[in-house]
Image (tube, rainbow, N blue to C red):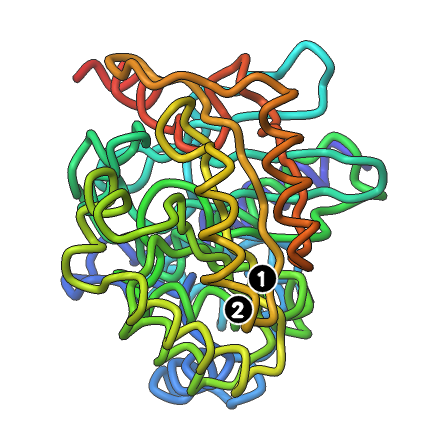
Amino acid sequence: MGRQKGLDDIRQREWLMAGSETETEEPVELKGLTLDELEEVAESLGLKRYRGRQLASWIYGRGETAFDEMTDLSLEVRRQLCSTARISSLTQVAETRSPNEETVKYLFELGNGMRVETVLMRDGDRRTLCVSSQVGCALDCSFCATGKMGFRYDLTAGEIVDQLLTIRRLHPDRQRPVTHVVMMGMGEPLLNYEAVLKSIRLMNLELGPGLGMRRVTVSTAGHVPGIVRLAEEKIQVGLAVSLNASNDNQRSSIMPINRKWPIAALLDAVRTYTRMGNRRVTFEYVMLKGFNDSDEDAQRLIQLLNSIRCKVNLIPWNPIAGQDYGRPDPEGVERFANILRSGTLTATVRYSKGVDIGAGCGQLFDEVEKSSGK
């Protein structure tokens, strides 16, 4: 009986693929399409609109990429889809685990041969996925390895959401799926705005991952128009702003974006976001020993931020090759945090997970380049 079923499955796949090689038009890519778009594709193929919902459930809910596995679609429909559409997926190239198993770094290859890293972090019952939105980054922050790559490529919405779908499929602890997503991997998310926003909506899709908007955080180096635009969307995603300095001269020397949108303009945009989204913003502050970690820096931060609904994440710098910044000692970091707290700011210290495997904040670069032979 089992042998016969296997033969039947082979015949079914052969039948599904029959004639598909004669098609000359480029198949339509389905991963990355919204529910409405999938329904429109179904209609364009002469199918009922509800077939789009079925496709959404298979692609985003179950992570399926093979039409022949979509058993609630008729053989005729599956054969038609095989000849007119495709569902691409990331290819896992490497996986690196920290010794304590709290952090796993995945190296994925895109369809164009470029590669990105995605990091899964475990903390109790919380499973946070750090997702990339670009290959490389154009902003060239001096303390960040990714910026040293320069800009290479904007990921599509499908390639961004597929990082979540692939991790869900590979996740070794399936009863505890990814609970949070942070757009803090490679790239500046607000420079790939449309694809990032679309991917977030796909992550939120009820037929798919069903990840609540409040469980998604978008991180930015300070792209002011993007922050304002995101505020106008009025979606309940979190916003994390990489501040890293207490005055313009200091910030411009390590973050070229500050020369275009200085701190005053950045904070005005943040106020717009907090007002329109009714959400607290997180300011990320990478601490560089002897550069931005003085008591005076802490006092200036209090003056800058005490009128904004926010919290401050202090991140001791994670070493990268070719940079001679220092990492403040734990006592200095805690003193800095206490000064902020005394000024009524909420301040936390975040030692990045996965620093030992090059998966910490600002470290995503070396392994991509080495693995791709560049």
Q: Residues within 10 Å of mark 1 (few under 14, many from 20)?
A: many
Quarter of the rendering containing residue 237: bottom right
Task: Measuring from the top left, give residue 293's x and y in whole percent.
Answer: 46, 32
Front-most of 62 and 23?
62
Looking at the rendered structure, the kind of residue marked 2 is Leu
Disc 1 is placed on an element classified as helix
Q: Pick the quarter of the image with the N terminus.
A: top right
Quarter of the rendering containing residue 102: top right
- Depicted 371 relative to depicted 228: above or below: above
Residue 60, numbered circle: 1
Looking at the rendered structure, the kind of residue marked 1 is Tyr
Q: Residues within 10 Å of mark 2 (few under 14, many from 20)?
A: many
- Looking at marks 1 and 2 on the same chain, the residue that comes earlier in the sequence is marked by 1
Q: Which residue is painted at 69% across and 50% down in the image?
A: 341
Question: In this figure, which residue is indicated by the disc labeled 2?
Answer: 202
Residues under numbered marks 1 and 2 in contact, where contact means CB atoms less than 8 Å apart? yes
